[in-house]
Image: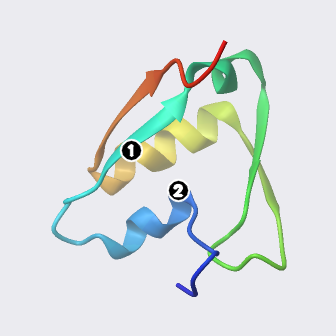
Amino acid sequence: VQQGSVSPFGLINDKEKHVHLFLDKKLREFDRLAFHPNINTATLVISKTDFISFLKHTGNTFEFITLYD
């Protein structure tokens, strides 16, 4: 992944599951989410349900936290 292109989808490259992902709680308010697909010249829109399924499939740990008010 090129510098500046890191997204949650980069977890597919973490074969040893070293990364713990922190997500803003506000993302839970939306049905669809948009992220760069490991390249910052494109955007992928995915349902929140499918995104959570992807995160669980990677095997990495993740949690929703309050990043700002």
Q: Is residue 36 above or below residue 58?
A: below
Q: Pointers 2 and 1 in contact (CB under 8 A)?
A: yes
Q: Amino acid at mark 2?
A: Pro
Q: Secondary structure at mark 1?
A: strand
Q: CA distance from mark 2 to mark 1?
A: 8 Å
Q: Which residue is mark 1?
A: 21
Residue at (26, 50) in percent of width and height: 59
Q: Where on the picture, by quarter, is residue 15?
A: bottom left
What residue is shown at x 52% (from left), y 56% (from top)? 8
Q: Quadrant of the C terminus?
A: top right
Amino acid found under the numbered disc labelled 1: Leu
Q: Nearer the viewer, residue 57 or 24?
A: 24
Residue 55, position as x, y percentages in the image: 43, 46
Residue nearer the viewer, 25 or 13: 25
- Residue 46: percent from left, percent from top: 74, 47
20 in relation to 49, above or below: below
User: Which residue is drawn at the image coordinates 40% and 69% (left, top)?
Assistant: 12
Image quadrant assignment for residue 11: bottom left
Vertical arrangement, residue 27 with respect to residue 37, above or below:
above
Residue 4 placement, left or right of 17: right
Please indicate whether residue 60 sits to the left or right of residue 44 in the image. left
Give percent across and percent down for residue 66. Answer: 52, 18
